[in-house]
Structure formats: C-alpha cells, structure tokens
Amino acid sequence: MFVYCHTMPRRFASISKFQTVDQTRRNGAIGALKTSGHPVALIAGTLEQMTKQQLVEAVSVKTGRETAEVENVLEAALWSIAEALSSNERVDLRGFGSFTVKNKKERQGRNPRTGETITIAAKRDASFKPGKELSAKLILPKTEKANPSNSSLT
C-alpha cells in the first residue's frame, strides 16, 4: 500500500512523494492513514491548508484516475455549486454539508489606518455549514486524565 503525501512540511522533508506505510513510519511521519489496500493521503499534524491542485492529486491517487480527468470533474463540480449559489439555491451534499447564500446588510466600519468611519456596502456571500458526519470526524478524541481515586496504589 502506498501513501501519498500532499504536503511536505520541513520535518517530513525526508519523505518521497510515494512511500509505503512502513517506510513512512520509519521516517517518523505521524498520521499515516491505513485503509484496506487503497492509497490514501498522509495527513500530517502540521497541515494547515490544502490547495485545489493538492486535492486533485490526492483524489487522483485514491481513485486511480488521471490527474487531468479528476481536475475536469472537480472544476465541473465547483462550477455547478457556484451556478446554483448565484441562482440563490441551496446546495446540500449529504454527509458533508450545505452551501447557502446569505445577505449581509450595509454597516458602519472604521478604516484601521486613519480611524475614519466608513460605510461597508451590502453584499451577498456564500456560506458553508458542515453536516453531522463531517463535524463528527473533526472532533478530537478525549484523553484520559489520571484520576487519583481510581489508583490501584491506594
């Protein structure tokens, strides 16, 4: 099984683009995900953002499809979501979340450089609300705290 590393933080500089899970563990990379024989993305603890190209590469590796094909599908999906939002429609992706359009009212603000009061124009903005399944995946596991009353030494 191969692991695809979509980011190369400095502490993982020794990881080549494609390595087995065992090779990744020997090099000290934490967080290699194991699935039943499928290539997966290496999620490092230092991951802060993923670009569209990195997403395309990760999906390409996971599905075994060509990068150009995955890129075309992703572009079509994003274009369809943008078109629906521009028509003021809600886009629900079950298990992931929903995209909606929110109307922001005109409001007063301050220019941070001069302190002058300015009027911020009203606008429509896209909003994303994560679904239950996505929210559940983002919850960090609780660590057990040592409880002195349960100690076997007493």
Image (cartoon, helix red, strand yellow):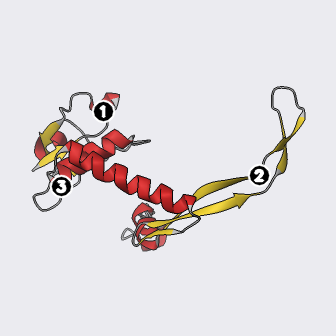
Kindly report the distance in space between the C-alpha atoms of the residues bearing marks 2 and 3. 42 Å
Res. 32 mark: none
Q: Is residue 61 visible?
A: yes
Mark 3 or mark 2, which is nearer the start of the sequence?
A: 3
Task: Name the side, left or right, on which 46 lies relative to 39.
Answer: right
Mark 3 or mark 1, which is nearer the start of the sequence?
A: 1
Kindly report the distance in space between the C-alpha atoms of the residues bearing marks 1 and 3. 21 Å
Secondary structure of the residue carrying tag 2 is loop
Secondary structure of the residue carrying tag 3 is helix
Question: On the image, which quarter does residue 80 sit in?
Answer: bottom left
Q: For this rendering, which residue is in front, 136 or 51?
A: 51
Residue tagged 1: 8
Q: Amino acid at mark 2?
A: Ala
The local crowd at label 3, few if under 14, some if 14 to 19, many if 20 or more residues have their Cα within 10 Å, is few
2 and 3 marks in contact (CB < 8 Å):
no
x and y percent of residue 65 in the render?
16, 50
Residue tagged 3: 63
Question: On the image, which quarter does residue 116 sit in?
Answer: top right
Task: Name the side, left or right, on which 127 lies relative to 107.
Answer: left
Residue tagged 2: 122
Q: Is residue 26 visible?
A: no
Q: Is 139 placed above or below 55 here?
A: below
Task: Name the side, left or right, on which 29 lies relative to 96.
Answer: left
Residue depicted at 31% across the width and 37% down the height:
7
Q: Amino acid at mark 1?
A: Met
Q: Is 39 placed above or below 9 here?
A: below
x and y percent of residue 122 in the render?
76, 52
Residue depicted at 39% across the width and 64% down the height:
137
Residue depicted at 83% across the width and 50% down the height:
107
